[in-house]
Image (cartoon, rainbow, N blue to C red):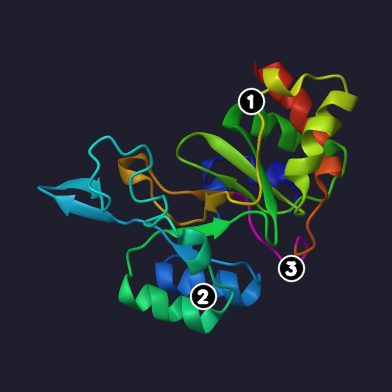
Amino acid sequence: MGVEETIAGTEAVQIPKQRGESLLETAVRYAEERHWDVFPGTWLEAVDGVQHCSCEDPACAAPGAHPAREDWATQATGSATVARRIWQKQPGASILLPTGRTFDAISVPETAGFLALARMERMELTLGPVTLTPSRRMEFFVLPGASVKVPDLVGKIGWSPATLDLVVLGEGGYVAAPPTRFGSRGAVQWACRPTVANRWLPDAEELISPLAYACGRDR
């Protein structure tokens, strides 16, 4: 599937919908099919018809979509059996994926992300999965180790890393996976869905030029 299709319209961005699939089934599928570690985050609770984060902080920045405990890294599992057991206990828990293990993620503003996707399509680059979050960020999955490489790579192509809104999530970080919801702001979606073709992730080096260029333009 070409990037043009993924960015052609709202419907295309909302793939896959996973209609009828529970968070439990999705978490299990990520562990089983993609060999991604997964861990449960907070969840949403309705109080007087309003969705609140289970962390009970009224000013929560990512309601229902952040780690529920400080030792979340030890909870992360690549076992489908363990994932099933975890979500059976808390079926509403968000699905979070630790970075720095099977993948790192390069996070850019949504506007820069779409610009970069179009450019990557023209360059015929092979993409890994890409998420689109309700906080208007796009997260490009790349091989682990990106957090170490990216500052140098950005500098080599003539940009100052400090001036670009380009963040690498590596060891100690995490991303929220579809269909996790951020309170009333909506759900995380796939801008480029996981497929058999993109099981092998690109190296950060392959994507950094169009991403840095798009972030520079987006300033």
**Mark positioned earlier in the residue sequence (1 or 2):** 2
Q: In the rendered view, would you say 103 is above or below 156?
A: below
> Along the line of sight, which residue is nearer the eye, 70 or 212?
70
Check disc 1 and report the residue beneath it: 165
Check disc 2 and report the residue beneath it: 28
Q: Amino acid at mark 2?
A: Val
Q: Amino acid at mark 1?
A: Asp
Question: Please, what secondary structure does the residue beneath circle 1 have?
Answer: loop
**Tag 2: Cα neighbours inside 10 Å, few (<14), some, or many (≥20)?**
many
Query: Residue at the spot x=37%, y=56% of the render?
Result: 68
Please state if 125 lies on the left or on the right of 98 as rendered: right
Q: Which residues are magenta?
A: 191-198
Check disc 3 and report the residue beneath it: 196
Please state if 85 lies on the left or on the right of 48 as rendered: right
Question: Please, what secondary structure does the residue beneath circle 3 have?
Answer: loop
Observer able to see residue 138: yes
